Each structure stands twice: as structure tokens, then as C-alpha cells.
Image (spheres, coloured by chain):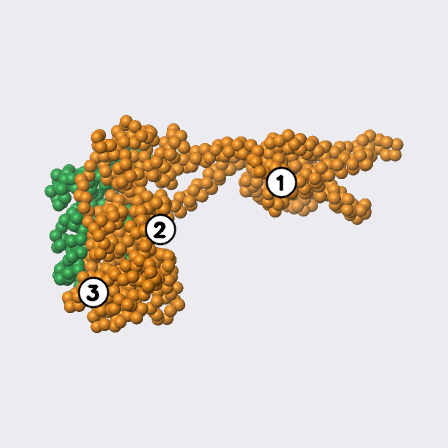
Amino acid sequence: MDAKRVETISARVDAAVSSSDSVEDELELSAVRHRPEGLEQLEAQTRFSRKELQILYRGFKNECPSGVVNEETFKDIYSQFFPQGDASTYAHFLFNAFDTDHNGSVSFEDFVMGLSILLRGTIQEKLNWAFNLYDINKDGYITKEEMLDIMKAIYDMMGKCTYPVLKEETPRQHVEVFFQKMDKNKDGVVTIDEFIDCCQNDENIMRSMHLFENVL
Amino acid sequence: MATGVAAWLPFARAAAIGWMPVANCPMPVAPRDNSKRQDELIILNVSGRRFQTWRTTLDRYPDTLLGSSEKDFFYNEETKEYFFDRDPDAFRSILNFYRTGKLHYPRHECISAYDEELTFFGIIPEIIGDCCYEEYKDRKRENLERLQDDQEENKDMKMPNMNFRETMWRAFENPHTSTMALVFYYVTGFFIAISVITNVVETVPCGSTANQKDMPCGERYTVAFFCMDTACVMIFTVEYLMRLFAAPSRYRFMRSVMSIIDVVAILPYYIGLVMTNNEDVSGAFVTLRVFRVFRIFKFSRHSQGLRILGYTLKSCASELGFLLFSLTMAIIIFATVMFYAEKGSSSSKFTSIPASFWYTIVTMTTLGYGDMVPKTIAGKIFGSICSLSGVLVIALPVPVIVSNFSRIYHQNQRADKRRAQKKARLARIRIAKSGSANAFLQSKHNGLLNELLELTGTEDEEQKLTKSISLLESQHHHLLHCLEKTTAHEFVDEQIYEQNCLETALQTFPSRSPSMSGHDSPAGSCCGRRGKKNTPLPNASLPTAHPIPTHQGPLQELSAIHIQCSDPLSHTASRSNLNLKTGDSSKINCKGGRITTAIISLPTPPALTPDGDGLHGPPQRRPPPPPGHPPPPSIQTTMSSAGTNIVKVSAL
């Protein structure tokens, strides 16, 4: 995948070599442009068919002609689906979950890998992904603080005008309920095994995991 | 929903998986995507030129002609393409809008032709991108002004049924409408000129007489000048009174600048008549005569240029003020310096700093009268610095300021325009956004109606309802619904939210049914309870407390909905949000009847449902009843005592 960044790297090298003292030239040339891997490779790596990949890429490239999404654009796009609240915090967490190589931008490969797990993956994979989303610092444990952040971000998306009225301690209470359910050994953190175990025993969650399978 | 990102809806929905482990309630069912159509190429034949695009590109904006089913009207079966009999050049920019999400205004297009195309294809001009919006608005304004000019010319045709007063006013404002008006116009102009000339000639020395030398003419021919003055003032007074009589809004007329000038022009004469030739007041009397010169401003009614000049000065007042301020600063600085420099020398004219002001002004404007000159060396040095800087301070910036005036003036106009436009645009976009939020809330009610009708209604009724929401919208609403379920809170309207805040503030304990607090539900599910709430439909009244029977089983509450089939519930399916055409959306298929749906818990007798009552909260979507529930009651249909056709449906 990095080989495809040759464009940007060589551009940067050219800029350095061609004695550019002017800052503008550098900035212009190092505009990131990213081309994804070939269709066959993506087809092999994800569970999407060729046609589906085509449709996904067309939509993706239309919104982001440069081929990568940076966090600002990501937040903008996601916020448009939730006009009543503030979706930027949750979008930030989502962005980190999609940006698997943590380079600050989501390329089409990251995007399509994430979608493949979410839409076509096994329950195990989906739960893994969700755990990864909640585990903000990616250390393998979900602490109460991390969960509280996530919960607040979700509640922020609801906005102000809700019924019943959102109180300050609602996210905290929700986190308590969550930990009661998930934290089997009561050590204050939820590990991946506890999480998967617990979710697999919960009917509601299992059913809702299949909800979006026919998206696309 | 901002339709430009419709392509990302699948992603947003997939990401909703992240909420699932957190949610405590089950999620709603996803809308079915029955039409599993592959993405296909659509051919758009616009007056012979064929454009091709993907169907999903057009579907991005379901509020427009090409994005909705309206284009089916233009479908040509034989050639399997959509034919539009419109201008293909203008169509290019419209199709680019679908592709890129930005609408551009091609500068070579005529503004009204472009407007027509936009209206035809159902695109509002506010979407035009920032790069082209200003140009578009400018051209539109020019066009509008031209239309107004044309209209004004037509307005000069004499309208029938104008009463005398209106005729007079029109004659005053537009002198070229009738001969009388023209005559009046010239007569007043002539007398203004006479009056001004009289005032001037009055002071000219008329040659010597036997008594005294060099008397001004005014004192020599007192009577003649007095008669002339009287005649002029009489004419002006008559004119003013006639204008006052004819003015459509007397108060506004009296406040206008021209009328103030008129009054100031004739007042000194009357004051002079009233006052006697007293020695004490004659000084004031003389001062008053100065005001007679204001008669010259009456010419501004006769001269367009003068009016424009006055208006320009008024609008450049801030720049002039700044110029004056900087000059004052420089004057004070140099006057102070000169005063202290010349303090030492004897018989210096620079007696105080204010006295030095005169020197500074005269020097800086390079007048140099010579009545005050510095004598000390330091004074001369500073004096020369003063005169040099005066050249710079005044002479150089003046042309720059003059050109700045015109530039800043135009720029200010444009900036204000842009600001006003931006406000209007943002307001419209906000309406569209809130429209989408409202669309979700409304479709929630409609969705519930859907569900209930599914149980009782006929198949085709359901078809009609489900068709009117586009798949995209239903998917988006499903997404929002999932979020509601995750957080166990609901989206509500601003009004309801405020109402709730008021009510919770007023009430110390909920006087409504205990179901609202949700405490005594053994099921304890977050979604098991919905308090009653008012929905902003007509006939809404405050909910009355229902006697909820206490049962040992999981309590489901009693709620009744009156859904009035009228405009408030009309679907905002297509065209309504962005184009703000709320009127022509399809109605639910009941003509004026009222449908009441009640979800009655068991074993509550149906008599508990109140008739003709206000609106209550929507029936909650209950999870499938856990085992152990008694069998659901049968469907009951009763006629309410009010006599209206209220169908009560109870279902589980």
C-alpha cells in the first residue's frame, strides 16, 4: 500500500531537490494524492464483490477527490447525518477506529476494510471491531473513563431536545449499567474476552448485529 | 439530511454497529430495500444532446426533478431515455451539480434563462457555490432594477380613480407627468433662484447717495427687497403647504430632509416679522438672515446630481470623520510643539496652544497667510517640518482618499450585501436542516401509523403509505431511530422540549400517570415506558392523568393517538424540505376523517380510553411480549360518542 504513495514521496523529493525556498511550492507539491490498490487485490482482501467495490469507490472518490479522508472532512460528513446534535466527538472515535494504520487519514483501503468487517464479517469480527472502537488507547482494556467518553460522545449526538430530558449523569449511569453487565470479574476494566462472552450471551445484541447486513 | 452525502449513508449505517453493545434495548427493524437494482447508466437526452450518468448520481438529490420520480414523466419508452426539451448548454451546469455537489453559474448565460432552468429542474438558487453566488446575485439585482425601471415608466400612465390628493402628489414628485406640474416645477425653481440672487445682491454696495457713501443696496431699496422677499416666501409657504396636504404620509413627509430644508428656508422671515426692531434682538435677527441661504438647498429637488452628492457624503461620513480625526491629531501635535518652541521669544504671537492651532492649520494646508510666523530657530525648524508634513498629510492622501471613497463605498455595499445574503442563505439552510429533523419526527408518527395499519389496514393502503417515503429517507430515519434506542432517549421538537422543561419545573412531582417516571415497571426496560407527551398537532391539549391500573404484570400504558388527517401530518417526502413547498406533499389517505389509534393494555377495559381527548404520546414500540403474557385482546372498533369516525384499534 505504501508503494502507492510514491507519488507523494517523489513529489516531496523533487520539491526538496529543486531548491525551492518558497514555501508555497512545497505545499503545493506535497498535496496528498492517493491511489488505491487494484480491484482484484481489494476483492481478495474484503468480502465485497467487484460491483460493490466499484459503487463504494465511486461514492468515496466523489466526496474526497484526493482519495483520502482527513479527520475534518470525516467529521463534517458524519455530522450531516445527525443534524440535531453534535457528532464530532463520536466521529473522532470512529475515525480512529477506521484509521487502522494511524497515519491521520483514512484511505479507501481502510474504509473498505472497515466496511467489510461491519457489513460482512462474522459476529466475532464485528464484536472485535466494536471493542476496538471503545478501547480508545488501544491497550486491550476498556476502562470506565474510556467508556464514559464514548458514551458522552453518543449522547452528544442526540442534542439538546430529547425526551426524556438528558441529565448530566445519564451517560454515567449508562456506563454503570454497561460495566455491571460486561465486567464479570469486577476488576474495573472490560477485556476483549469478557466483552465477547457477554455480548454473545445477550440476545438483543446478537440480533442487532445482524441488522445492517443488507446495507449495500 | 444533506443530500450531497447520501453516498455515505451506507457507511454511517455500518458504523452504527458501534452502538449495539452499548444499547440496552432492541433495535428497530431496518427498512427493506425491495428494489435491489443495480446501478445503471441513465441517458438524458436534452434537445438532442445526450448526457449519461449513473442513476445513483441523480439520486443524490431526491428533492429535485432528476432525483425524484418526476423524471418518469419524461421517459421515452421507445428510445429508453429521458427526453427534456430544454437548453443543453444550461443543462451542463445542472448535471455538474449532481456530479460535484456544487452548482455554478455560467457567466455567459442570461440570468433569467438560467433561473428558469433552475426552477424547471427543481433546484433552488441558494445552493449556488460561493464562487459564483455573488455574481449571480449581482446580475439578478441588475435585472430586477431594470424591470423596476420599466415598471416605473409604465406607472406614469395616469391611473384611473386617483383622487385629487394623489394626483397632486404625483405631480409634485414627477414633474414631467403633466403640464401643470411642469409649470409649477419651473416657477418654484425660478423663485428659488430669485430669492438667492436677492440675498446676494442685498449686500452689494449700491453706489453713493447724497446722505452716505457705499450703502448696500439692501438698505437703500429696503421696500423693494422686502417685497421681493415676501413674494418668494409666500410662494415657498404655499408650496410647502400644498406638499404637506398631498403627502400620503404626513408624518413621514415632515421628517424628510427636503421638508426640513423648506421649513428652515422660510422660518427666518416669519420670525423676523414677529420680532420687533429691538436693539437687543436685532443681533439674533441678523443671524437668522443667514439661514436664508439654505434656500439654495431647495435646488436639490430640481437637481439629481445634488441629491447624489448629498447621499455620497452621507455614506462616506466615516471616512471623512477619520480624515478629520487624523488631521486634528497632527494639528494638536504641531501646535503644542510650536507653542513650546516659541515660548521663549518675546512678542511672540504664539500666546497659547489654541492660538497656535491657527498657525498649524494655515501652514499644513500650505496657505501661509503670514500673520503668525515663528521667530526662534527651533520654531522655524519645527515650522518647516510642519509645512512639509502638511503636504504629506493633506495633499498626498487626498486623491487616495477620494479614490478610496469610491472603492470603499462600493466595497461596503458589496460586503453588506454579502452579509445580508449570507444571513438569508444560512436561514434557509437552517430551515432545510430543521426540516430534515422534523421530517424524522413526523415520519416517526407516520411510521407508527404504518405499523398499525399493517395490522388492520388493507394491503394497498400500506403500499400507498410506504411508497411515499424514499428508501434513502427511511434508511436515514432508521439510523436515527437506532440512536434513540441506544441512548433510550427520543428526539423531540423544540416546542415539546421547552414545554417539558416548563412542566418539570412547575411540577414537584409528576401529576401524570406514574408510568412516566418509569419506576414501577418490573420489566425495567428502558423502552418500556413512554410518558404522555403533546405533539404539535392541532387539538392538542394537556394530557389528563389516566388512571393506570396497577397490575402485577409488566405495565404497558394506555395511550391514544388522534391523528388528524390534515396538513400538519402531510409527508415531507419529496420536494418539501429544501424547496420549502410544504403544501403540495401527498396526504395520508384519509380525507378529513380522524383516526384514533389506541394501544390498550390488557386487561384494561377499553372504556378507559378517553374520547375527543387531546393528543398523547405515541404508542411505544414494545418488544415482543415475553412469555407468560395473557393473550392479546381482539381488535375493537367503536364509534365514539362525538360522532366522528374514530376507529379505535387495539393491538399488541
Give the alpha-carbon distance from disc 3 to disc 2, as whole Å.
33 Å
Query: Badge 3 local density, few (<14 within 10 Å), some, or many (20+)?
Result: some
Residue at screen point 30% across, 52% down: B590
- Report in which chain the residue with disc 3 lies: B
Q: Which residue is mark 1?
A: B165
Give SS at disc 2.
helix
Where does residue B361 sit, x and y in percent of width and height? 63, 39
Residue at screen point 28% across, 53% down: B446
In the figure, is residue A104 to the left or right of B271? left
In the figure, is residue B530 to the left or right of B158? left
In the image, are marks 1 and 2 on the same chain?
A: yes
Give the residue type that dot 3 points to.
Pro
- Report in which chain the residue with disc 1 lies: B
Query: Badge 1 local density, few (<14 within 10 Å), some, or many (20+)?
Result: some
Residue at screen point 33% across, 68% down: B545
Give the alpha-carbon distance from disc 1 to disc 3, as whole Å.
78 Å
Q: Which residue is mark 3?
A: B633
